Image (cartoon, helix red, strand yellow):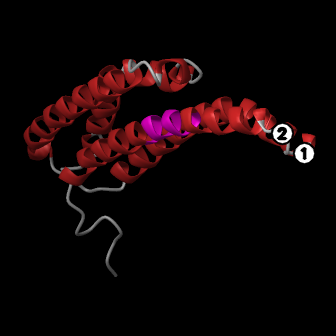
Amino acid sequence: MRRFSEGCNPRNAILDTLVIVIILSVLAIVSVIAYNAFTEVNADIMADDTMMSEAQNISNDLHTKYPPLMDNLFLFAFVLLVIFVVISVFMLDTHPIFFIVTVILLIAVFVVAMLLSNVYDDVMTDATLAGSANMFPYMSWMNDNLLGLVIGIGFLISIVLFIKYKG
């Protein structure tokens, strides 16, 4: 019977970190842009006299709950993705000789993390999105410190990847 980890490439474990970084960066940018659009729609709904007050109250309530919901969802997704990657990496059988390849791939992931952090910063400092970006403190902090987080995750994955070598 074939084991789950047979046939898996140990280099893919580090690339999982890259997937986490890209998914979360896109989620953060899309969430802020969507909130900015929802703010404009909500303002139009509130200004419309033909709308029923119940519809206005629902829209205003959703507008109020959106930032903390998406911000906490972002943090929850980050924690779950890191746990998933650590568990999946632990299931791989690797040899310590792959450590060199792991370090090279980690450097590439660090460069991508720096670039995505800069992209987030450039997008969020735009005048139209700056006010909306302040409503998401977890997203802002995590993307401002993305390189440090990715370095920590990368070294955690490297340790878990090679800690169980049995010779």
Residue at far front of view: 49
Q: Which mark is residue 44?
A: none
Q: Amino acid at mark 1?
A: Met
Q: Are marks 1 and 2 in contact (CB under 8 Å)?
A: yes
Residue at far bottom of view: 1
The secondary structure type at the circle numbered 1 is loop
Image quadrant of residue 82? top left
| Neighbour tally class for label 1: few under 14, some 14-19, many 20 plus, Cα within 10 Å | few
Q: How many marks?
A: 2
Which residue is painted at 14% across and 31% down in the image? 107
Which residue is painted at 31% across and 22% down in the image? 122
Q: Position of residue 163 (x, y in %)?
A: 29, 39
Query: Label 2, on which residue?
Result: 56
Image quadrant of residue 92? bottom left
Q: Nearer the viewer, residue 62 or 78?
A: 62
Which residue is painted at 77% across and 33% down in the image? 47
Q: Nearer the viewer, residue 46 or 119?
A: 46
Q: Position of residue 2 (x, y in %)?
A: 31, 77
Q: Which residues are magenta?
A: 27-35
